[in-house]
Structure formats: C-alpha cells, structure tokens
Amino acid sequence: MNDIFVNTAYFGIVLSLLTYWLAVQIRKKLNYPIFNPLLMSALFSILVLVVFKIDYQTYNQGAQYISFLLTPSTVCLAVPLYKQSQILLKHLDAIIMSIFSGCLAGMVCIVVLCVLFHADDVLLFSMLPKSITTAIAMGISQLVHGNVTVTVGVVIMTGIFGAMVAKTVLRIFRIDHPIAVGLACGNSAHAIGTAKALEFGEIEGAMSSLSIVIAGLLTVFLAPFIASFFS
C-alpha cells in the first residue's frame, strides 16, 4: 500500500483535512466533550494508516506541510488580545500572578509524579513543557535534553484533554469570570484550550492567548531551572 502513496506528496494533507472535516461533522451531531474534533481526527487518521498498512513516514511526507502553519496560527491569536488590551492593563498584576502560579504548579506536579513513579529523567524533561504551545515546547524540550517526540505527544494530549474537560471543570468549581476562564484554558491547555476559550467569548479568548505567550516565556526560564536539579 505504501507504493501507491509514496510518490503522492499530498496524501498526508488530504487525509488530515478529510478526517478533521469528518470529525467536525460528528461533533455537530453529537455535541459531547469526548467528540473533540482534534481527538477524533487523530484517531481516524491512525485507523486509516493501520488498516491500509501505511507507515508514518509516507503519511508525513504531505502532512508535514500543515505543521508549517503552526507558528503563524499561534501568532494570529494575538488579534483578540489586542482588542482587549484595556482589560489586560487593568488586571495585569492578577493576570501575571495567575499565569506564574499555573506554570509552576504544572511543572511541580510533573516532577512529583515522575519521582513517585521512578520515571526516567529524559521523560521528566520531556514532560516539563506539556502545558505550552507545541512551537515553544519543542524548543524547550531540546534545551533541557528531553525527547521532542514525547514532548509533542504530551502537549497534544494535554491540549485535547483540557479542551474536553474545560466546561465541566469550570461548572463544577463555579468559575465564570471571563478573565479567569480564559487564563485557566490557556495556561492548562495552550492553543487547543484557547480555541475552546473562544467558544466562551472574546474576552476569554484574548486572556487565553495572553496566557500562551506569558506561560511560554516563563517556562523557558523555569523548565531549565527545575531540570538542573536532576542533571
């Protein structure tokens, strides 16, 4: 089966777009958190590759071009942030403290769990940047000598899980302030969480976008510092 697709540069792109479109149609019919379009499209793509025995390298020949859009799409998240700049300046101290606390808590949890389960140091280093956007997390993983492939997988799973449970968690803890909602989504589930935050409202999306940027910058400093204790 690989021979059919090996010279088809656009196979990966077509498969990715078709599976995502199918996942979106399913979500429209079944509006439950478990039917997250990104999760469903990933599962559909994996199913196709397994059933037709197509290896990942063949698929990625075309799919890799979608990855080029990752950085510019992340930058575009600054648009709603710019529109809500007045709110940002008004609550800047609380916002910075919230994001810092979220980053530190996330990494401390990773350290504690890895120590409790006697995980390898490389796994620990790879998981430290789990809650920031992939474009930044990959660079941090390389910086602290983690496994970039593991980092990407963990970041994606973190984002999907965060988007799936966001509405339920916010309802259970009665969190309804738009700034708090946006910061929680962005700080825990990065870009995928921001897409979810935009569903709540424009202010939520703007605060989530801000959280991605500041959380990424803080993690650049915090991750190597924490990793140095295990080197």
Image (spheres, helix red, strand yellow):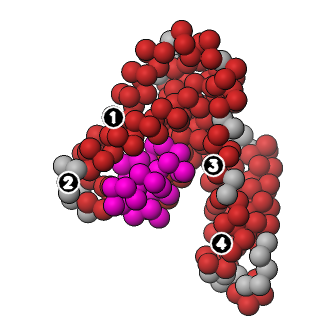
Q: Disc 1 or disc 3, which is closer to the eye?
A: 3
The earlier-in-sequence mark between 1 and 3 is 3
Query: Between residues 47 and 139, which one lies in front from this camera angle?
Result: 139
Q: Which mark is residue 71?
A: 3
Quadrant including the N terminus: bottom right
Q: Which mark is residue 60?
A: 4
Q: CA distance from mark 2 to mark 1?
A: 18 Å
Q: Which mark is residue 230?
A: 2
Q: Disc 1 or disc 4, which is closer to the eye?
A: 4
What residue range appears in magenta? Answer: 127-152
Q: Secondary structure at mark 3?
A: helix
Question: Please, what is the three-letter code of the amino acid marked with disc 3?
Answer: Thr
Q: Which residue is mark 1?
A: 105
Q: Secondary structure at mark 4?
A: helix
Question: What is the crowding at mark 3: few (fewer than 14 residues within 10 Å), some, or many (at least 20)?
Answer: few
Question: Please, what is the three-letter code of the amino acid marked with disc 4?
Answer: Asn
Q: Classify residue 86 by image quadrant.
A: top right
Quadrant including the C terminus: bottom left
Question: Please, what is the three-letter code of the amino acid marked with disc 1?
Answer: Ala
Q: Are marks 3 and 2 in contact (CB under 8 Å)?
A: no
